[in-house]
Image (spheres, rainbow, N blue to C red):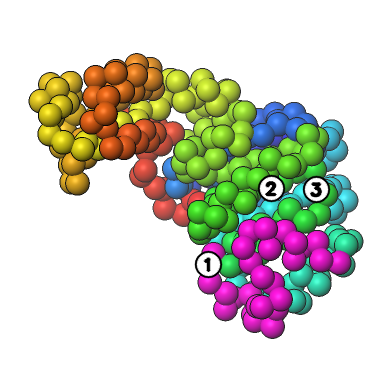
Amino acid sequence: MDLELLNLTRRFGRTTALDDLSIHITTGRRVALIGPNGSGKSTLTRVLMGIIDAEGVIRMDGRDGRRERADLARRLAYVPQVAPQFGASVAEIIRSIGVIRRLPDGRVAERASRLGLDVGAVSDKPFRALSGGMKQKLLIALAMAPASTLLILDEPTASLDAAARQAFYELIGELDGSVTLLLCSHRLEEVRHLVDRVLGLHCGKLAFDGPVGEYLGSRSHGVVEVYLHATTHEPWLRANGFRPGAGRAWARTVTHAEKVALVNQLTSVLKGDVENLVVRDLDLVEDPIRDESTREGIA
């Protein structure tokens, strides 16, 4: 699905959640929508789903996203950031979605099983009685069971365990090339390997739009952690900007450009003294997209 948004504006009282926002996402793109809490991500996803309205233009495959909402809705799938508190049972929800979306029998159960959820074991339970992880698995299964052409997933991995997260990544990798994917997260680290484009929101405005590699290269810092067998190379680590931590760990913050060179240097100098080596990306505190401050009343 081709998605075009022109001059979207949404206000909550005196607070502007979306501020004259214009975005064009072509068919089949894999896009990360990132930004801190309060940047407007969830507001934008709710507008796209027709849950709330906004000023401006919404076009989906060239069609009016408001006037033709009922027909277009059949092509959309959505996982909200906060799970709804349905009183209906798991079986009732699956049956209802199956009828509405004309799904083959067992389709949702198969998707849920891949994520580690046995729907048969919880079929009689009210949805709201499930654990956070179970709710998330079922919501993802319900979203990925139909043949949707636009998937909007808001913090989809937030409550998933490691195995379920890996299964989710595999399901995303199996999507048809014509499916447009919008993954919302306040941390690019969670979804960067699934996307090819980054849209960064800040205070309801588009603060970044470009390839994921460009975003990482220009805005990302990281931490290099090295764990030693012995103390032989500790003076060298200290002289090269590393600081000691617990459990024989030494760490140094680096820019994206420095990471590869430093890792090569570590393996060359420390050689057999390395017990483990960990490289983690961090968010830049000074990056306005990643500023963790929140604005009251905006999701």
Give above or below for 132 relative to 253: below
* Label whose residue precedes the other's in the sequence (2 or 3): 3
Name the residue rendered at 49%, 37% in the picture: 188
The reply to whether callout 2 and callout 3 are in contact (CB within 8 Å) is no
Q: Position of residue 224 (x, y in %)?
A: 30, 31
Element type at mark 1 = helix
Cα separation between marks 2 and 3 = 13 Å
Q: Residue at x 31, y 23 (%)?
A: 267
Q: Residue at x 80, y 48 (%)?
A: 148
Q: Are the residues at dot 1 and dot 2 in contact (C-beta closer than 8 Å)?
A: no
Which residue corresponds to mark 3?
A: 148
132 or 167, nearer to the observer:
167
Q: Nearer the viewer, residue 172 or 36?
A: 172
In the rendering, at what x and y percent does residue 35 appear?
48, 39
Nearest the eye: 293 or 86: 86
Q: Which residue is mark 2?
A: 171
Number of labels in the image equals: 3
Q: Quadrant location of residue 102?
A: bottom right
The residue stretch that appears in magenta:
105-133
Q: Is residue 158 left or right of residue 21?
A: left
Query: What distance separates the C-alpha of mark 1 from that of mark 2?
Result: 20 Å
Residue type of the residue flagged with mark 1: Gly
Q: Give yes or no for residue 115 being in the magenta stretch.
A: yes
Q: Earlier in the sequence, mark 1 or mark 2?
A: 1
Q: Is residue 256 left or right of residue 201?
A: left
Pick the residue in front: 233 or 190.
Answer: 233
The quadrant of the rendering that contains the N terminus is top right
Q: Residue at x 69, y 53 (%)?
A: 78
* Vertical position of residue 233 compared to residue 247: above or below: above
Q: Earlier in the sequence, mark 1 or mark 3?
A: 1
